[in-house]
Image: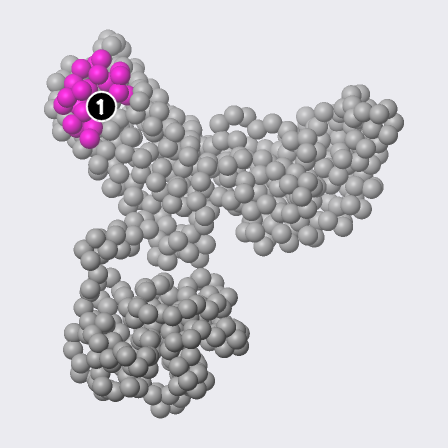
Amino acid sequence: MVTTSGDWSNPRPNLLDIPAQFSSNLLGHFREHLAKCSEGMAKGKNYSETAGVSGQDERLKWGFGSTSKRNFADSHESELMNIFGQAATRLPFARISVAAPNVRANVDATEVEKQFQASSEDWAGQSGNAENVLGHHLIETADKTRREFRFRGMGDDSVLQTIHLKDTRQPLERAVDSFYSRFFPLGYPNSVSEGYLVYSQYRAVQHFASAVLSVLSTQSLLFAAGLRPTPAQATIVSWVLKDGMQHIGKLICSSMGARMDSEPKRWRIFADVMYDVGAGLEVISPLCPQHFLTVAGLANMAKGMALVSARATRLPVYSSFAREGNLSDLYAKGEAISTLSNVFGLGVGIQLASTVCATIQGKLLIAPVLSAIHLYSVAQEMRAAPINTLNGQRTAMLVADFLKTGEVSKPVDLRYRERLILPVGLQQESGNVRVGASLLKTVSKPSVLSELKKSFGNERFLLNFSDQRTDLVLHQSATGEDAVRGWLLAAYACQLAHKTDQRSDGHGDDSHGFGLKKAAALRDAYEKTEQSLPALLEGLRENGWHTHLFLEGSGYRAVW
């Protein structure tokens, strides 16, 4: 996208994220572009061009003389994309800007040079040289190092010169930039999906509340055991008390991995609920000291279940934010946020344990508040995550939206509509489809199975229509596209059966015999499916959905 802007009166570079290690290919293209633009620069034309670099969303900006001319900028749109769309995307990241100071009669070239705060001037072309002012400046920033790259000359005779710059940023600006570089992925916000900031904010609050609660619960455990520890001792001893029954909790949850793949956000919330259950048992343990071992064991078992669930669902959630293959960077920065929040939380917990929560009454008052903050934060954190894998709930919403609007929803469109706590029911708009049921429960007798196999031929799914729902049975080798095809077919069959019902008796009644009407509408439903399925699948792929697999959780698949 190329746009024009007015006078660029401030020659100070505006730092923007683009690749900063220049290959000879990129330098050659840049020199060629400068040569082509030399005529326009000599005439004092002024425009600001912004070119999106393909695959990375970075931008470059140029500034020239005094008057804006849109037609001059528009004529270079395809050229700019060709220059920076390929050579730049293969290069590492750093913060860089491209800028040229304005050229006016009343601007002293020496003053223009001072804007860049050069630490030395040991390069050719001093401030009095007009060509020096007309040349383009590229400012590269990597951590605390800033360098200026300047092109002198035009065409094949242009020379790239380098000079180190002083860091003229204000302390607050440096602190903010340092914070972002340490706690947010490289290239943020362009390198992550929508919702990552909300996710990170609530993740910090969640870990803070969890850390405070852990100090209070551990101190209560030690009181129940007959000890009188200081708050600092409670933090240390917590490492000893985490074993034992915790391993049993880990084993219980380790067998539910497939369900966690299908519903990572639901199971992440489950993990924090179990953690708070464990912390709550530890808080009330002084009230029943005679049952200390039992209460402490159950608390650690709950925390063991929480630990496995949280770790198993972490990567699917992070993967939903990774737009540029930067999963490791996302994971590292997410753990940095968690660690920082935990450190602050432990400090606040120690203070509370020494004051307000020094008694069991104080803990019983504060612990529910911390738990509420903790669970609310993790719920909002999970709602912000745009999971892009197909499961029963998300596929039902996708098909329903497609039938209603003709458009394919994006992962970010569904994130706040997913049910994360309450059970997921059937959706009438998408055909009341139930996926993953056992074949023994779906098919009542062998003759029905034989008839279904004959009806669906070489499909990698079977649809068994009943009055209240449609059971979708997936073949062992079925992909996400097969599941979407079967779901769309079932939805069209249900839609056509409703129309038949309305024509026959004036109202849509899902009473006895409606399943037979859906089966009778199968041929027409197939025709509608063949017409609209390509657009649906193409839209899913374009919007970032993973159509190569379908995650049914604990559901069954069959081989026939």
Q: Which residues are magenta?
A: 348-367
Percent coordinates x, y for residue 470 in the rendering: 71, 31
Question: Is residue 357 located in the magenta-colored stretch of the structure?
Answer: yes
Residue occupying the point 23% across, 33% down: 345
For mark 1, give the secondary structure: helix
Question: Is residue 96 located in the magenta-colored stretch of the structure?
Answer: no
Vertically, is 178 above or below 259? Answer: below
Within 10 Å of the Cα at label 1, are there few (<14), some (14-19), or many (20+) other Cα atoms?
many
Which image quarter: residue 136?
bottom left
Q: Which one is nearer the viewer's eye here, 391 or 554?
A: 391
- Which residue lies under the disc numbered 1? 216
Q: Is residue 45 left or right of residue 176?
A: right
Q: Quadrant of the C terminus?
A: top right
Q: Main secondary structure of the magenta part?
A: helix
Q: Residue furthest bottom?
A: 157
Percent coordinates x, y for residue 466 in the rendering: 75, 27
Q: In this view of the protein, can residue 90 be seen by the observer?
A: no
